[in-house]
Image (cartoon, rainbow, N blue to C red):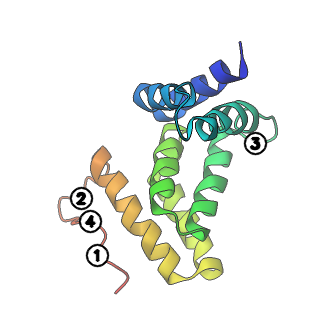
Amino acid sequence: MTNREAGINVVREMMGDQAAAQLSDSAGSNTFGARIAAYAVDQVFADIWTRPGLDRRSRSLVSMSVMIAMRQPHEFAIHMGAGLNNGLTLKEIEEVLIQALPYVGYPAIATALAAAAEVIKERGLDVDENYAGHRGLL
């Protein structure tokens, strides 16, 4: 199996068939950004996500923490979805936000909370009928 195939398999397992197909098509397209997509598949997913030492759940926790600190809500949502697929619970993801709070501050957490609320809504994960989504910190 090539690095590309291994990387696409990891993407498929963590993010689903559609994400794997999109990233594979992008990496092989020979268009603007194709080399960046290829690096993501070949290095990030094939080399880093498959290393021994941390399981995928742990790597998801680390990735989400980095996205919180960098205030990257889109990437946080992608990694939250992957984390859920890797076996994380909403409670564990909430604990990541709580753990990060004193280090990154309320604005970064509020940004991540809004992204998390979208993932929760899209996946139908909040079963409380009174939940109206993230309402801010106040």
- The quadrant of the rendering that contains the C terminus is bottom left
Query: Helix, strand or loop at disc 2?
Result: loop
Residue 91 position in % (x across, y down):
48, 58
Marks 2 and 4, how far apart at CA = 10 Å
Query: Helix, strand or loop at disc 1?
Result: loop
Q: Crowding near pointer 2: few (<14 within 10 Å), some, many (20+)? A: few
Would residue 118 appear left or right of 7 to someone viewing this image? left
Q: Earlier in the sequence, mark 1 or mark 3?
A: 3
Q: Which residue is located at x 43 percent, y 75 percent?
A: 110
Q: Which mark is residue 133?
A: 4
Tell me, yes or no, whether the two marked residues, 4 and 1, touch with CB atoms within 8 Å: yes
Query: Helix, strand or loop at disc 4?
Result: loop
Query: Helix, strand or loop at disc 3?
Result: loop
Q: Earlier in the sequence, mark 2 or mark 1?
A: 2
Q: Which residue is mark 3?
A: 54
Outermost residue to the left: 129
Marks 1 and 3, how far apart at CA = 34 Å
Q: What kind of residue is marked 4?
A: Gly
Q: What kind of residue is marked 3?
A: Leu
